[in-house]
Image: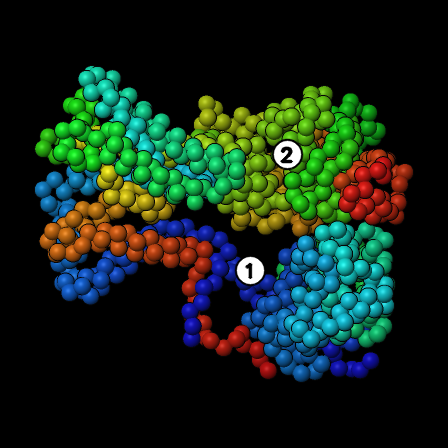
């Protein structure tokens, strides 16, 4: 190791309309170092790495690469310097093979010679098993990520940037990834690891730069800090344990019963649901874990009625056969839903909060009469949601897009919870939400269950499931494992289920 | 230095209203240049084109005559466009509406007015709706793009009209001209001011604008159309059925266009001929956009575009310019409007052409 930093950023400023994404950010990465970039969503991490990778230009500031000032013009230039990046969202063509996808990313056609052999070589060297001839749409998300990593490694990078790489992996896959990254670091490749998962960072990284609201707030050694300390640096306030606790035993009547729900997905690359059965009692929170893309979206659509789920008896809401009903009818008989995506699904960005309150609230709150909207009642309802859920906004007339992610999510959750549903299905309720809002959302879900509602919580965040839920099931490859009491299972057991029963297309015999 | 478009990250309220005003100003300036290039005095030409038609005898009522069909169709188009249903075939729905309504008028000339005229309007509305619903059928059943199908159906409608007036419905006493007999007095859309051509159409147009406004801002259906346009997934989440909304939006556009067609042939024209519309159905698209897809805005936009028809006639008579001036005005206006609308989402910035300053 030398004393010259591999990468040194000083005073980086990047202004977006209405938001100062990076405010005089400094960052130093030494050769062979695994460096964590830690911060909540919206702290400016992604902007900073996009500047390093040449996707964005800084408004101000200096970039030193191996001691020399550089202006990184574009990602191609960054790759030439030796910077590789694995994005959170992959850019792969589903219909092409692994080798074809990698070949498409190479700028120099000469590099394509002997590509297959080199893919095999690198993937075996670094413990990233990949078959170059398989089509991408057959691969799991973990395998797709390997393609992106191998694509970077082919260029022998000096710095590898990983943006939230573990959000799509099982705990076991995470372990394997860490082995690969440690191996790379030992060979002198620096790694800039972006995450908001504290335990991972403490396990992997030797240095951390913590960002909040566009500024660097601390540099530290994560191995010597506790997760609580890191979290408090990250959110800038003290963490309080949730004040609402679960009421005792769950013994209410079953309020949501799903039996043998099978749905063939319309989408070529969607996941078909196969024989899903479960039942949730009043007062119970059932967590459904799983890696993204294993049927969560399809299950949410089937439960909400956006996609018809076949025979009426397939889904019973509070004892009423509802499989043939659309979302409005299901709301009438007592169900409420919070889809994963706020913008454009759970809420309309271009409409006001009042209008968004009306969107799903008009049925249970009778906000329309004779086909006309009751504006007074609608505004009142929106105001109630804003007040009870402490939504930071100028009022019901504010457009949804003017709210931060956390505030809008609080509004969406509040809108559903205040409808006093007997059944609530929520998907990824705290995705991309700040810690304060997440705590408020968790509390609302717990209170609703304590009042006797049946809650289904679909989430990729195992911590969330283990904290909130009574029972847990895992969805993989469109199948749901049998629910188990949270107290009777462990993260590693769930991890195996998350990866275990996902099987290649066409295998319909496995149970 | 260079001009750069920078995303605002939100919709500018100011520019959504200022954009049409700026577009109109730019259009007038461009028209002045065009007149100049054509060798005419731009001031006199603009006066002839934009002012004279208004101050002429019966200018105001003539303007309302032109604006009525534009308002009726502009309101329908606005509602459909709000739901992302891009029906550009109002011209065809207008034509079929005129055939249906006019057909009833020709078939039962002796029925009393109070029975016959409402029947004609209902028939016209049904005709326009049926034509638009073909588009709905193709989109909801076969996923066919409504922009293409509605445009193609317009040509078919035009050919049906020509066939009818040259064949089965041709006036036997018409010296072989391709036109039907004149409508009977009972089948005629009455004028409301003696000595002008102003007919009942303006009442229907204003009623449609008021109803459209109520529908859009106060009704559940209007809300559904808007959500469908903004975020189709949110519409599904709320339980609004997309196919039903597509059918409804097209039925509304078609019905209003059909009524406009009937009012036009039974009023100012008085018979069916191959030329029953100077492109009202297409102009109504510009009206809808210029009026911000808002029924009240549509009324004002229709007055301006209606003026372009009168101005075109005046320019033809007094300046010896081709009537294509009308089309040029409308085209230039749409061009500038689409350009200016960029400012709703983007702001213009002057920028040094050097890349972002990096202190070395």
Residue at image location 54% in from the left, 62% down from the top: A16
Whether callout 2 and callout 1 share a subunit is answered yes
Q: Quadrant of residue B348?
A: bottom left
Q: Quadrant of residue B146?
A: top left
Q: Is residue A243 above or below residue B98?
A: below
Residue B339 seen? yes
Residue B247 horizontal side relative to residue A274, left or right: left
Percent coordinates x, y for residue B241 in the rendering: 54, 32
Front residue of A408/A124: it is A124
Q: Residue A9: where, in percent of width, then height?
A: 66, 74
Q: Disc 2 versus disc 1: distance between alpha carbons?
A: 38 Å
Q: Label 1 lies in what chain?
A: A
Q: How is the image coloured?
A: rainbow
Q: Which mark is residue A19?
A: 1
Residue behind mark 2: A307
Q: Residues within 10 Å of mark 2 (few under 14, many from 20)?
A: many
Q: Which mark is residue B234?
A: none
Q: Which quarter of the rendered picture does the N terminus of chain A lie within?
A: bottom right
In terms of secondary structure, where does tag 1 sit?
strand
> Which percent across, then down, holds residue A194?
73, 62
Most foreground residue, B182 or A499? B182
Q: Secondary structure at mark 2?
A: loop
């Amino acid at each position: 190791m030398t004393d010259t930093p591999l990468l040194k950023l000083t005073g980086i400023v990047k202004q977006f309309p209405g938001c100062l994404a990076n405010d005089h950010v400094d960052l130093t990465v030494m050769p062979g170092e695994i460096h964590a970039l830690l911060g909540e969503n919206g702290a400016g991490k992604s902007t900073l790495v996009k500047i390093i990778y040449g996707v964005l230009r800084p408004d101000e500031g200096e970039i030193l690469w191996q001691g020399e000032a550089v202006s990184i013009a574009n990602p191609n230039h960054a790759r030439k310097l030796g910077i590789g990046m694995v994005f959170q969202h992959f850019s792969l063509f589903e219909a092409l093979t692994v080798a074809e996808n990698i070949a498409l990313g190479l700028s120099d056609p000469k590099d394509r010679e002997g590509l297959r052999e080199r893919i095999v070589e690198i993937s075996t060297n670094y413990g990233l098993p990949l078959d170059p001839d398989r089509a991408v749409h057959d691969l799991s998300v973990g395998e797709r990520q390997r393609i992106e990593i191998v694509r970077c490694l082919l260029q022998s990078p000096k710095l590898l940037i990983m943006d939230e790489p573990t959000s799509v992996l099982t705990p076991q896959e995470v372990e394997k990834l860490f082995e690969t990254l440690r191996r790379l670091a030992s060979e002198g490749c620096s790694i800039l690891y972006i995450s908001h998962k504290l335990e991972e960072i403490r396990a992997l990284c030797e240095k951390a730069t913590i960002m909040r609201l566009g500024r660097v707030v601390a540099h530290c050694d994560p191995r010597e800090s506790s997760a609580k300390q890191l979290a408090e640096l990250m959110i800038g306030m003290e963490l309080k344990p949730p004040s609402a606790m679960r009421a005792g035993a769950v013994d209410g009547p079953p309020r949501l019963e799903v039996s043998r729900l099978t749905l063939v997905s319309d989408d070529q690359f969607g996941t078909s649901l196969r024989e899903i059965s479960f039942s949730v009692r009043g007062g119970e929170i059932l967590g459904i874990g799983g890696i993204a893309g294993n049927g969560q979206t399809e299950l949410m659509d089937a439960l909400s009625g956006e996609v018809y789920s076949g025979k009426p008896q397939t889904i019973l809401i509070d004892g009423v056969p509802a499989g043939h009903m659309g979302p409005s009818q299901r709301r009438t008989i007592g169900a409420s839903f919070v889809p994963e995506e706020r913008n454009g699904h759970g809420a309309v960005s271009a409409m006001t909060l009042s209008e968004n309150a009306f969107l799903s609230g008009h049925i249970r709150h009778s906000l329309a009469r004779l086909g006309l909207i009751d504006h007074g009642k609608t505004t009142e309802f929106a105001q109630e949601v804003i007040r009870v859920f402490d939504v930071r906004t100028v009022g019901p007339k504010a457009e949804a897009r003017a709210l931060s992610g956390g505030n809008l999510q609080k509004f969406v959750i509040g809108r559903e919870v205040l409808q006093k549903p007997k059944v609530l299905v929520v998907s990824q309720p705290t995705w991309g939400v700040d810690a304060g809002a997440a705590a408020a959302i968790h509390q609302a879900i717990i209170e609703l269950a304590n009042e006797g509602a049946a809650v289904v919580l679909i989430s990729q965040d195992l911590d969330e499931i283990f904290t909130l839920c009574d029972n847990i099931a895992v969805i993989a490859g469109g199948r749901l494992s049998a629910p188990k009491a949270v107290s009777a299972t462990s993260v590693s057991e769930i991890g195996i289920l998350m990866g275990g029963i996902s099987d290649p297309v066409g295998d319909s015999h496995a149970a | 230095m260079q001009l750069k478009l920078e995303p605002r990250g939100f919709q500018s309220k100011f520019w959504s209203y200022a954009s049409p005003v700026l577009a109109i100003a730019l259009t007038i300036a461009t028209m002045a240049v065009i007149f100049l290039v054509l060798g005419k005095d731009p001031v006199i030409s603009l006066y002839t084109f934009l002012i004279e038609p208004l101050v002429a005898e019966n200018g105001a009522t003539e303007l309302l005559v032109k604006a009525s069909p534009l308002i009726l169709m502009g309101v329908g188009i606005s509602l459909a466009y709000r739901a992302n249903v891009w029906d550009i075939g109002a011209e065809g729905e207008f034509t079929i509406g005129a055939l249906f309504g006019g057909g009833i008028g020709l078939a039962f000339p002796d029925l009393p007015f109070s029975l016959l005229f409402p029947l004609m309007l209902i028939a016209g509305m049904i005709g326009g709706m049926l034509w638009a619903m073909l588009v709905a059928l193709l989109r909801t059943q076969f996923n066919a793009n409504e922009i293409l199908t509605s445009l193609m159906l317009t040509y078919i409608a035009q050919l049906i009209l020509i066939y009818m007036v040259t064949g089965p419905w041709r006036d036997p006493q018409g010296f072989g001209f391709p036109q039907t007999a004149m409508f009977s007095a009972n089948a005629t859309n009455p004028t409301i001011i003696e000595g002008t051509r102003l007919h009942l159409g303006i009442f229907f147009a204003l009623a449609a604008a008021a109803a459209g406004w109520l529908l859009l801002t106060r009704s559940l259906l209007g809300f559904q159309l808007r959500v469908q346009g903004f975020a189709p997934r949110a519409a599904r989440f709320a339980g609004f059925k997309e196919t039903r909304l597509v059918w409804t939006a097209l039925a509304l556009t078609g019905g209003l266009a059909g009524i406009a067609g009937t009012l036009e042939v039974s009023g100012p024209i008085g018979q069916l001929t191959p030329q029953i519309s100077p492109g009202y159905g297409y102009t109504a698209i510009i009206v809808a956009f210029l009026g911000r897809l808002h029924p009240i805005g549509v009324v004002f936009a229709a007055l301006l575009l209606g003026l372009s028809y009168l101005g075109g006639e005046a320019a033809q008579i007094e300046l010896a310019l081709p009537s294509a001036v009308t089309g040029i005005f409308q085209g230039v206006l749409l061009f500038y409007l689409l350009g200016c609308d960029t400012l709703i989402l983007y702001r213009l910035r002057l920028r040094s052409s050097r890349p972002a300053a990096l202190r070395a």
